[in-house]
Image (tube, helix red, strand yellow):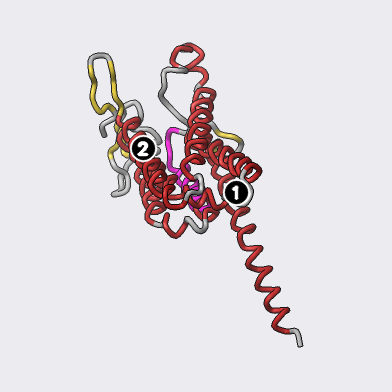
Amino acid sequence: MAPVLFTLDRLVVYSYQVVLAISLLLALAWLAWTGRQHRDGRLDAALVALAAGVLAGRVAHVLGNWEYYAERPTAILAGGGLSLHAGLLAGLAALLAYSWWRQRHTPGEAQGFTQLLGALVPALALGLVGGWLGCLLGGCAYGRDVPPPQRFYTPDWPDLYGVRAFRLPSQGLGLALAAGLLVAAGALTRRPGLFLILAGLGDFLIAFTRGDLAHPWGPLQAIQWADLALIAMGLTLEIVARRPAEHRDTTETLVSRRP
């Protein structure tokens, strides 16, 4: 792995930051290009969600590691870690608020929350690829170490602190999940609820393999509760999306039965 990409005098450039930044820039560039064709406000929505996600992700990361930051308050604003789950949930909440605001101020033109979320699915998948690839290079989200005998699925990978051990391939599993979602993103734009279900369920299962999680909330880790929230939101969107179709089918059946 290569946690440090390069150093320039006192400036240290980390792989995670560069890879994540590139993936986000590519996602925004794609949204800007497709937004010129659809003109549905997807780029503006993405920027609002990204700003809320970065802020919430940083706050959650600092609070989750408060013992460290309490002794180093200057490091709070120095950049660094982000909580992906807090950022994603906050971004979705911001997207919901943005879609509500647009529908109130531009009725008849603005897209609803489900339509906007569907438009952002490829960008979200690309961001997940960047996040997991960055962790693979940087050592974050590392897997639990496995005692002998080792198996083919326990690579000798380092953790965030450079300690090498035979581990469960959490980062590899996460990267495979994100890549699969990116490949299927074209189809999932029409079913954003299913995207949230698959992303949440996959990450929920991967969390059982991770060795870096130290914030249990009852029987589960904190991020797993966030995954369950994503799954619940996805199920809600799927149910809401199916209701009109079922109602239409029922109506058509009744009409066809009329004498």
The residue lying at 57 percent from left, 37 percent from top is 94
Q: Residues within 10 Å of mark 2 (few under 14, many from 20)?
A: some
Q: Residues within 10 Å of mark 1 (few under 14, many from 20)?
A: some
Q: Nearer the viewer, residue 110 or 77?
A: 110
Q: Secondary structure at mark 2?
A: helix
Kind of residue indicated by mark 2? Leu
The residue lying at 68 percent from left, 68 percent from top is 247
Please give left or right for residue 194 compared with residue 256 in the image.
Answer: left
Please give left or right for residue 146 compared with residue 11 in the image.
Answer: right
- Which quadrant is the C terminus positioned in? bottom right
Residue furthest out toward the right: 259
Q: Secondary structure at mark 1?
A: helix
The residue lying at 58 percent from left, 50 percent from top is 109
**Residue 78 in view of the camera:** yes
Q: Which residue is mark 1?
A: 233
**Where residue 4 sits in the image (x, y, percent)?**
27, 26
**Where residue 28 sits in the image (x, y, percent)?**
40, 40
Give the mark nearest the N terminus, 1 or 2: 2
Q: Nearer the viewer, residue 225 or 126?
A: 126
The numbered mark at residue 25 is: 2
Residue 69 belongs to magenta span: no
Q: Nearer the viewer, residue 206 or 82?
A: 82
Please give left or right for residue 229 compared with residue 254 in the image.
Answer: left
The magenta region covers 197-212
Please give left or right for residue 223 compared with residue 144 in the image.
Answer: right
